[in-house]
């Protein structure tokens, strides 16, 4: 998992969203919660305390890093 995440982070322009200036009128914005979760995912900090059942599909499991939620 770490190799895959690091490979994505090193890809060309992978970090550009951090420098982008959003335009609210065009719907180009992130809430503080979205931004924090993206950073936590990219830094490989767990998003959830324990693995849980997905509240939408109720069959698949969300791991602590939010893999099901992100993909």
Image (spheres, helix red, strand yellow):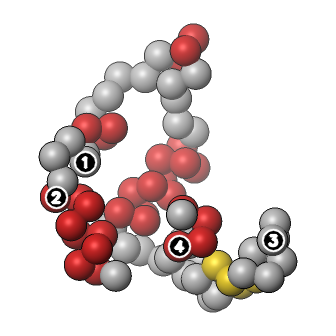
Report if the CB atoms under discs 2 and 4 are less than 8 Å apart.
no
Image location (x, y in percent) of residue 48: 60, 77
Q: Secondary structure at mark 4?
A: helix
Give the residue at mark 1: 14
- Which of the 4 image quarters holds residue 20? top left
Which quadrant is the N terminus positioned in?
A: bottom left
Report if the CB atoms under discs 1 and 3 are less than 8 Å apart.
no
- Mark number for residue 10? 2
- Which of the 4 image quarters holds residue 53? bottom right
Q: Residues within 10 Å of mark 3 (few under 14, many from 20)?
A: few
Left or right of 44, for residue 16: left
Above or below, 1 relative to 24: below
Cα gap from disc 1 to disc 3, whole angstroms: 30 Å
Give the residue at mark 4: 67
Above or below, 27 relative to 70: above
Left or right of 30, for residue 62: right
Task: Name the foreground residue: 39 vs 67.
Answer: 67
**Which residue does the image show at 64% across and 79% down from the upper left?**
62
Mark sitting earlier along the chain (2/3): 2
Give the residue at mark 3: 57
Mark sitting earlier along the chain (3/4): 3
Cα gap from disc 2 to disc 4, whole angstroms: 19 Å
Q: Residue furthest bottom?
A: 50
Mark sitting earlier along the chain (4/1): 1
């Amino acid at each position: 998992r770490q190799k895959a995440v690091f490979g994505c982070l090193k890809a060309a322009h992978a970090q550009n969203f951090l420098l982008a200036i959003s335009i609210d009128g065009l719907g180009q914005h992130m809430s503080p919660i979205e931004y924090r979760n993206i950073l936590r995912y990219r830094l490989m900090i767990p998003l959830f305390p324990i693995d849980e059942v997905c509240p939408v599909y109720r069959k698949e499991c969300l791991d602590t890093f939010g893999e099901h939620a992100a993909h």
